[in-house]
Amino acid sequence: MANTHKMTEEEREIYKQRRLEFNREGFKGLLSRDLPHECRVCGCTDESKLVYHHIVPLALGGTNSLRNIIVLCVECHAKTHMRISAFADRSRSGRHTTAPPDYKDILERYIEGDIGRSECERLMGFKKTSKIYDSPLYQRFLDEKGIAKVRNLIDIKTCKSPEIKVGAKIVEITYKDGASKEIYYTGHKFKKIIYKKAI
């Protein structure tokens, strides 16, 4: 049955608050402490591949209760969303259906600090309720590059000031082997890159 429910203003506000709560570092730490460190479907225990999945999606009224969140690997997470798409009208749920042919170039620009999150999501064709870090496609892209986490700060910097200041850190990348990379803005399209080897 297709999802024909259109969110009210109040439901949209509740959804936004729950997304913010879910994406807070402290909340992720709570999930890491209280949920098993293995995929609920296949039993995968590779920490770099594990993600948190809402059984009832937040957009459909789900909550951040531990009873509504399970651990899945990125492959099982992608398959779960494919199964959901067979029953839901994705055009109304805010989920993206197909990636643009140059999606790897777009994601590369995002992790290298050429564009911020909002521009990346726009180029990828995401709806307003979809976020790049929730995308299985993005998770697979990071896996291919051996990246555990990317923190792109461009949108945060441009919110505080119309222009990114010279010397501002714009991207932090943590690799699965423990190495890291920091990218700083040094002027028009110029960047300074600092690598730190794994200890």
Image (spheres, grey):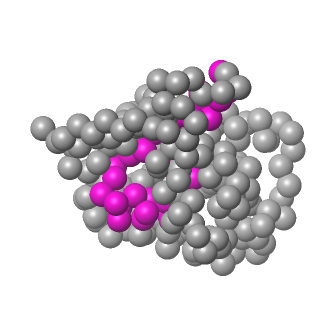
Membership of 151 in magenta stretch: yes
Is the stretch drawn in magenta largely helix, strand or loop?
helix
Q: What is the quadrant of the N terminus in the image? A: bottom right
| Quarter location, residue 39 | bottom left
Membership of 38 in magenta stretch: no
Out of 185 and 85, give the one closest to the viewer: 185
Image coordinates for residue 143, horizontal then vertical, percent:
35, 61
Extent of the magenta region:
132-160
Image coordinates for residue 118, horizontal then vertical, percent:
66, 45
Residue 70 against residue 4 in the figure, above or below: above
Residue 126 against residue 14 in the figure, above or below: below
Which residue lies at the image location 53% right of the left edge and 50% below the top edge? 110
**Residue 79 shown left or right of residue 16 in the figure:** left
Residue 89: in sight, yes or no? yes
Which residue lies at the image location 35% right of the left edge and 65% below the top edge? 144
Out of 59 and 189, give the one closest to the viewer: 189
Out of 165 and 25, give the one closest to the viewer: 165
Image coordinates for residue 197, horizontal then vertical, percent:
18, 41
Which residue lies at the image location 58% right of the left edge and 36% below the top edge? 188
